[in-house]
Structures are given as C-alpha cells and as structure tokens.
Amino acid sequence: MRPMKTIDWDDGSVLLIDQTRLPSVLKMVRCRSVSHLITAIRRLEVRGAPALGVAGAYGVALAAFTTRGRDFENFAGKVEAAAQQIARARPTAVNLSWGAEQVLARVQQARSIDEAREAALAEAQRIADEDVAACHALGDYGASLIPDHSTVLTHCNAGALACREWGTALGVIRSAVQAGKKVSIISCETRPLLQGSRLTAWELDRDGIPVTVIPDSAAAHLMRKGRIDCVLVGADRITHDAVFNKVGTYMHAVSARAHGIPFYVAAPLSTFDPDHGEEEIEIEDRDRDEVATFNGRVLIPDGVPVLNPAFDATPLSLVTAIVTPFGVLRPPLDWETIAAKRRVI
C-alpha cells in the first residue's frame, strides 16, 4: 500500500489534493490565503470530516502567518475572525470547527505575534499527526470486526482522501488486509457527486484491494441476496443520539438491520459531539446544479425544484458498533468518558 497525504503544510501554505479532479487527474492545489482555502473547502477540493479538521487547523495557522500588523490584540482579533469564517465554511462536519478552535486557542494564549505563529503551526501539525495516528489505531481495532473472506459495503469516501492519511472506514479495511484477511469491497457510487465511484474506488484500486462499484439503490438487493457481510462507513458528526454521514447512510443502516447485517461506523474522537443532539445540527443543503446537471447536460427541467441534503442522520439504535482510536464502542455510549478523552486530544 502506498501512503499519501491528502493535506499538508508546505512552504507557508496549505497543500492539498484537489478531489474534484479524481479519478482522472491527481492534482495538488496550493492555498496561500484563507479565502482560497475556504473556497477549496466549499468546492469539496478537500472533504471528509478528519481532513476538514486538519484543514481547519492549518487554516488558522495560515491566517496567523498571513495576517500583518505589530499590535498583538489587533492581530489576534483578525485571526479569530478568520477562524470563524473557516469554521462556518461547512456546517455539518464538527471536525472543521474543532480543528480551527484548537489552533485559535493557542494563538490567544500567546504573548506576541511571533509566539502566536509558532504555536499555531505547532498545534496544527500536532492535529495533523494525531489524525494519522488515530486512523492507524482505529484501523487496528476495527480489523478484528471484519471477517476473513468477507464482502464489506461502504458508502461515500472514508479513506485516506477523507483524512490526512490511511482513512477511517477504509483504514479499517486497509488494516484488515494488512493483517492477512481476504476482503472485497462493495462501494456505493454515492450520488450526486460520486465520492464512492470516483474516490473510494480510486483509492482501493490503487492499493490493490478488490472493489466493485454499485448504484446506491442496489445495496438492499445485494443484502437480501446474502452478498454483503457487513456495512462500514465513516462519520461527519456523532451526537448523543445519531451518526451524521453522507446522505444515503441511513437507508443502508435500515436495510442492514432488516437483513441482520452488522452496521459499523469508524471515526476519531474529534468527530464526536457530546454537547448536541440530532435536532440541533444543521444539515448542509448543497446547490441544485449538483443534481440537475452532469458534465454540462441538463437532467431536470428548468423550474423543477431539487432537494440536495449533503448528509443524513442515522439513529444510534441502528449502529452495531463505533470503531475509535481507543477501542470499539457499542451503544449505549459512555458519553462522560468520550467527552473526557475528547478534551485531551
């Protein structure tokens, strides 16, 4: 397997893979300004909850290095404003605001601009390195859940492209394969932006892991035919009552329960949100054109409205287990322990 870094700090800028160009072109984008990074986040050039956490962290470091001035109070105020803009770039994934807030706190604790810049970059790099370690740790824990000679269904992309490296759901798959298990993947195409067919299939094929792409609507059929052994997905936010992930996840969870198939979620602790419930979370609505057009071709008559939610919420009652860097958790969750561990990462 060939590790790759989805996002990194390089020469005073944020360097990231433009995921909108895959699988045809592997292109790196260099963001030298906060506004450019926010555009990259909104355009899904960088996406996936853990990767957004790293992007939020690097974004505040970028703000610290690009904000000019000699007065520290004014400097800190401008960095805070930039951090707030970064955190609001996409509302559903909690990791983005978490990463920005972690680095902003280090800036606000500093006593000079130079100290703030040094602390911001050190904290952002720590968060990036921790993401890599967390994905490998949860991969090792989750590998024990994957049967040998099994077929795993996954939805959207929760791989290296959704993290800094290795992946959450696909990190579990990679760790299982590394442990010698024979595993094949069914990847839902994940409409309307096809993260499953464009990104997950590209990653797994690159690593030599067998993968087959299906239309999202074929998943229940394959479960009924006994061709799926378990479902494994990532998460963009986990509240005390639900898992938020790419829209379509909920229907896979319902189908898995109906067919007696385990439904697993893989996520770092930065994805957990112990302070909120499902009804308090804003689900991002995306542009009509993502559904209404494809490669410049109009698919829906003008004037016909479109609903395009980016995420849905799966009740924890449908989740068999959640794989974390600290072990496998089974609902009902011990939120006091989760909150305590989350505060120290």
Image (cartoon, grey):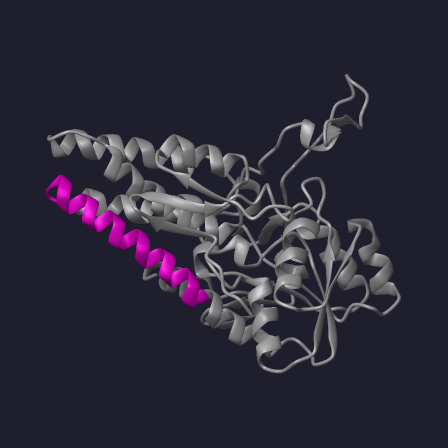
Q: Is residue 339 above or below residue 97?
A: below
- With respect to residue 4, does 275 lie above or below? above
- Please give the name of the residue rendered at 44% of the width and 60% of the height, measured from the top-left corner: 269
Residue 84: quarter of image = top left
Q: Would you say residue 240 is visible in this rendering?
A: no
Looking at the picture, tell me which residue is in the foreground, 159 or 11: 11
Does the magenta run of residues contain 121? Answer: yes
Residue occupying the far top of the picture: 303
Instruction: Check the image and report above or below for 40 versus 141.
Output: above
Q: Is residue 146 left or right of residue 340?
A: right
Judge left or right: residue 78 versus residue 266: left
Horizontal and vertical percent position of residue 329: 54, 70
Number of marks present in the image shown: 0
Quadrant of the drawing holding the N terminus: bottom right
Hey, which quadrant is residue 260 in on the image?
bottom right
Q: Where is residue 283? Give x, y as percent.
A: 58, 38
- Magenta span main SS: helix
- Percent x, y of residue 311: 62, 43
Identified at 62% across, 32% down, the residue is: 286
Considering the image in quadrants, where does the C terminus appear? bottom left
Q: Which residues are magenta?
A: 110-134
Q: Decide if residue 66 is in sight here.
A: yes
**Magenta segment includes 35:** no
**Picture coordinates of residue 253 (x, y %)?**
72, 58
